[in-house]
DNA sequence: CATTACCTGCAA
DNA sequence: TTGCAGGTAATG
């Protein structure tokens, strides 16, 4: 499940391969809806000859800037994969788009479940996206104080609030479960009941689990791969995600972990370390 | 605010 | 054969 560390790993891998390259054409696969209904032939004519000028990431969105203030926006959702292959390489199993570049390589977008999207955005579109999303959790502006303010009027479970991209951009199910465990906060806690001290600790743990995820080039629990098709290794660093169902012992106290559903998502936690108040 | 639809491979 | 996996938009 690509969350912030996985998306950033993809961006870091692609940046040196894309910037300065020009698009030659765009070739559709078996799922034309991948561009949200935009005609791919039309997109190909619009983008032919245009260079990538920069890559950016905002939350879980990849932004590949072209000239003329236009941007290719890619969201991998659940199972989207970007790879850079040679023109002569055969199509990937679930390939829905190939952006052919001027050096004989292709940026291929594949997605087993057809949730991911590749769209075209103007500078104004990007500005809207930027304001709709919450702060970047790895940025210096994301502090315990800011988190405390973001939670102040929220009555949903803390886990639901952390998953809300309008509140904080980039967290998903894996890193939320991990951060809450390390901060010893129960995922069902009402968000606005966190004390300033708890918010400070939670902000710190959010940064920590994301940075560790980034350092390990992402979590490849299922389908995540980097640009070279390599798995990340952060699944070895996880201590609660996915472990509640089997009742695995808590790595801190040995109590069997539990699984429940919060915000419609499978949620693992330690009933001893992460007490409700 | 919570729940459901969108998808499809895979485990039970 | 059923249901689970979950990011986001849409719906209630």
Image (cartoon, coloured by chain):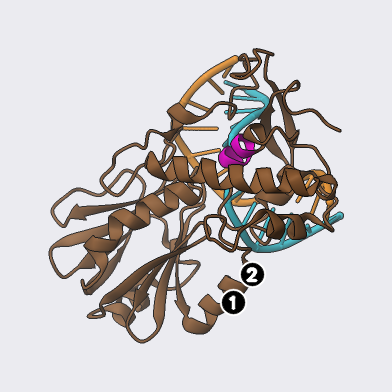
Chain colours: A brown, B orange, C cyan
- In the picture, measured across the screen, residue A88 lies left or right of residue A48, that is left
Disc 1 secondary structure class: helix
Could one spot residue A254 in this view of the protein?
yes
Going by the picture, which residue comes out furthest to the front?
A197
Q: Is residue A85 magenta?
A: no
**Looking at this rendering, what residue extends furthest in the bottom direction?**
A68
Image spot of residue A132 (x, y percent): 64, 70
Q: Residue at x 72, y 40 (%)?
A: A264
Part of the protein shown in magenta: A173-179
Q: Residues within 10 Å of mark 1 (few under 14, many from 20)?
A: few
Query: From the viewer's perspective, is residue A151 above or below residue A27?
Result: above
Who's the residue at 36% across and 37% down the image? A232
Location of residue A127 with respect to A196 vertically, above or below:
below
Residue A112 makes an appearance in the image = no
- The residue shown at (24%, 73%) is A23
Q: Are marks 2 and 1 in contact (CB under 8 Å)?
A: yes
Host chain of mark 2: A
Tell me the residue that label 1 is attached to: A128
From mark 2 to mark 1, how far is it between C-alphas? 6 Å
Label 2, secondary structure: give it. Answer: helix
- Residue at 65%, 22% in the rendered image: A244
Q: Can marks 2 and 1 be said to lie on one chain? A: yes
Q: Is residue A77 above or below residue A205?
A: below
Q: Chain of mark 1?
A: A
Q: Which mark is residue A132?
A: 2
| In the foreground, A253 or A44 | A253
Q: Position of residue A115 (x, y in %)?
A: 52, 52
């Amino acid at each position: 499940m690509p969350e912030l560390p996985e998306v950033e790993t993809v961006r870091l891998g692609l940046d040196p391969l894309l910037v300065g390259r020009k698009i030659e054409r765009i070739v559709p696969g078996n799922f034309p809806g991948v561009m949200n209904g935009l005609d791919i032939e039309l997109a190909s004519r619009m983008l032919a000859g245009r260079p990538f000028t920069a890559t950016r990431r905002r939350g879980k969105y990849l932004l590949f800037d072209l000239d003329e203030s236009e941007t290719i926006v890619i969201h991998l959702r659940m199972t989207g994969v970007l790879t850079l292959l040679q023109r002569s390489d055969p199509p990937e199993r679930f390939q829905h788009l190939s952006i052919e570049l001027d050096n004989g390589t292709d940026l291929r977008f594949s997605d087993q479940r057809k949730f991911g999207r590749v769209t075209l955005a103007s500078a104004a579109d990007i500005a809207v996206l930027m304001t709709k999303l919450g702060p970047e959790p790895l940025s210096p502006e994301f502090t315990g104080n800011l988190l405390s303010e973001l939670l102040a009027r929220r009555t949903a479970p803390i886990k639901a609030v952390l998953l809300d991209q309008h509140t904080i951009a980039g967290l998903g199910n894996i890193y939320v479960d991990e951060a809450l465990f390390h901060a010893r906060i129960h995922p069902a806690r009402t968000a606005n009941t966190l004390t300033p001290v708890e918010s400070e600790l939670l902000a710190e743990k959010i940064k920590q689990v994301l940075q560790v995820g980034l350092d390990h080039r992402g979590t490849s629990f299922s389908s995540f791969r980097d640009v070279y098709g390599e798995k990340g290794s952060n699944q070895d660093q996880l201590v609660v995600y996915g472990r509640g169902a089997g009742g695995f012992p808590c790595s801190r106290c040995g109590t069997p972990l539990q699984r429940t559903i919060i915000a419609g998502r499978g949620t693992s936690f330690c009933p001893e370390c992460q007490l409700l108040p």
